[in-house]
Amino acid sequence: MLASAKRFAAAGVDLAAYSIPEVIADMETVRGFLGHTRIDLLSESYGTRVAQIYAYSHPMNIRRSVMIGVNPPGHFVWEPGMIDTQIEYYSRLFAEDESARRRSSDLAQSMRRVSQAMPRYWLFFAIDPGKVKIMTHVLLYQRSTAAMAFDAWLGAEQGDPSGLALMSMAYDLMISKIFVWGDLLAKGGGADFDSGRDYQDLRAPASIIGSPMSLLIWQPASLAWPIEPISEELRRVHRTNVETLLVNGSIDFSTPVQYGSQELLPFLAKGRLVTLAEFGHVGDFWKLNPQAADRLLTSFYGSGAADDSLFGYVPMNFKAPVSFSVLFKIGVGIGLGLIAVVILLMVLFILRRRDKMGTK
């Protein structure tokens, strides 16, 4: 990241211009060019922070705003205590599922035990605890991938850490693609980075997995990128009269519903929160019931009345659609099988050559 920042600076790129206020300024330019007096906003996750600042900066230019996966100020940093709370929420759901309960009566405690004594190898494949925890955090965003993460952790508790080994290996292939890293540090860092904080406290050894993603991003941030903070005024929640609909899953790991309901909703004079039970982050909103999502959005934009009547309760399914353990074992088996075939062919080739030489 530091090398990238230096390369951009050497090329004359003004990294300070990559900020949320600049994004809003660009949007205002487009709004004016198109001749719209007022616009509707649809934002999700990081984008909800843009929408919040937009509503404060240009309240007369926004008609209605929908925020999915709400991120109030301060929460580009994931805190270990909230991560524990979310895992414990999953754990209670896990205990209510008869088939899941057979594997563990307390999912959170099972994960804590594995976290504190994670195996370092499966066969000859290394397991990096930090990488496993980061991938776990990412997988817990959505319901289906959360089930896959839990399956791997419980497999490790029961003596088979192959699923964790695959997650550790997947980190090297996937983590660089999860974010546009410079964009994240410039915009997210400008909004929430605290230069006076020691981000080492995110390790939180007494917690279940700590806050691995925050450690990855924010501990080295001040050394790896020239972060330019936006004004303190824009780093705070402000009251607004803009008609606003907040939508959150009750088990959203990236943007927990508690933040939006407790820290943002009280400041919205015309705000409403729809909490979707057992939905995770933004992807679950779009995928689990598209028809209900469409009805909710179109009704709010059309009349201001958010119709969430098509959303029914969808209980969490803890059966992993794909087991990392099974997937890795199949892959290893195929790989070893190919190696064995190659070795066999080489041996046959050598023996055949010897036979030919012996007949001369």
Image (cartoon, rainbow, N blue to C red):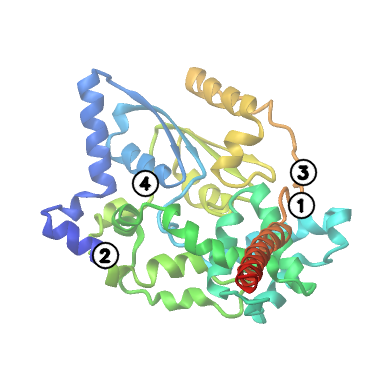
- In the figure, residue 104 lies in which quadrant? bottom right
What residue is rendered at 53% in x and 21% in y? 298
From the image, tell me which residue sits under label 2: 225
- Count residues near mark 1 (Cα–Cα under 10 Å), then give few for <14, some for 14-19, many for 20+: many
Give the image location of residue 233, x and y in percent.
28, 53
Give the image location of residue 120, x and y in percent.
62, 80
Give the image location of residue 265, x and y in percent.
50, 44
Query: Disc 2 versus disc 4: distance between alpha carbons?
Result: 29 Å
The tag earlier along the polypeptide, 3 or 4, is: 4
- In the figure, residue 26 lies in which quadrant? top left
- Count residues near mark 3 (Cα–Cα under 10 Å), then give few for <14, some for 14-19, many for 20+: few
Q: Amino acid at mark 2?
A: Trp
> Is 98 situated left or right of 16 in this image?
right
From the image, tell me which residue sits under label 3: 315
Judged by depth in the image, the label closer to the viewer, 1 or 3, is 1
Query: Disc 1 versus disc 3: distance between alpha carbons?
Result: 9 Å
Q: Are marks 1 and 2 in contact (CB under 8 Å)?
A: no
Tell which of 132 and 212 is nearer to you: 132
Query: Disc 1 versus disc 2: distance between alpha carbons?
Result: 39 Å
Q: Amino acid at mark 3?
A: Pro
The tag earlier along the polypeptide, 1 or 4, is: 4
Identify the mark at residue 238; answer none if there is no mark: 4
From the image, tell me which residue sits under label 1: 318
Q: Are marks 1 and 4 in contact (CB under 8 Å)?
A: no
The tag earlier along the polypeptide, 3 or 2, is: 2
Q: Amino acid at mark 1?
A: Phe
What residue is rendered at 60% in x and 74% in y? 127
Q: Where 131 falls versus 231 (above or below)?
A: below
Query: Disc 3 versus disc 2: distance between alpha carbons?
Result: 42 Å
Query: Disc 3 versus disc 4: distance between alpha carbons?
Result: 36 Å
